[in-house]
Amino acid sequence: MIDELYSFILFAAAMALVSGVILLRRKSKWSDYLAWSVILAGRRVAFVALHPRGTPLMGEARRIQESIGRIDPQKVRFSLESNP
C-alpha cells in the first residue's frame, strides 16, 4: 500500500513538472498560470485530505489481526448462533 502511495506521489510530481515545462515554453497568458496553480493547489488539498495516517484504533486492528487463527471455532459458532 505504501509503495502505491509513493508511486502516485512520484507520478503526480512528474506530471506537474512536465506540465510546468510545457507551460513555460509556450507563450502563456496569466490565466494559464492561474489555472495551473489552482490545479496544483487542488491536488495538494486532495492529498492532505486523503493521506493515510494512524488513528487511535490502529492498535485495535493489529490486535484483531493477531487473534485471527487463534480463535476457537466453537466460540465463533456459538457467537454466530446467539446473534441472529
Image: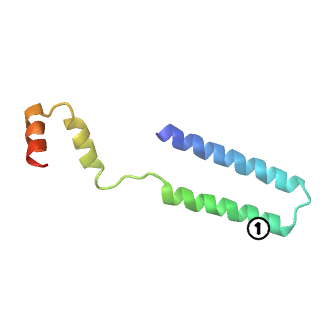
**Residue positioned 34% across, 55% down in the render:** 55
Residue marked by disc 1: 34
Judged left or right of residue 76, residue 13 is: right
Front-most of residues 70 and 74: 74
- Picture coordinates of residue 71, whole percent (x, y): 14, 34
- Total marks shown come to 1
**Residue positioned 67% across, 59% down in the render:** 40
* Colour approach in the figure: rainbow
- Picture coordinates of residue 74, whole percent (x, y): 8, 33
Q: Is residue 29 above or below residue 81?
A: below
**Residue positioned 62% across, 43% down in the render:** 10
For badge 1, the amino acid type reads Leu
Q: Is residue 41 above or below residue 76?
A: below
**Residue positioned 20% across, 30% down in the render:** 69
At mark 1, the secondary structure is helix
Residue lying at the far front in this picture: please name it: 84
- Picture coordinates of residue 25, whole percent (x, y): 88, 53
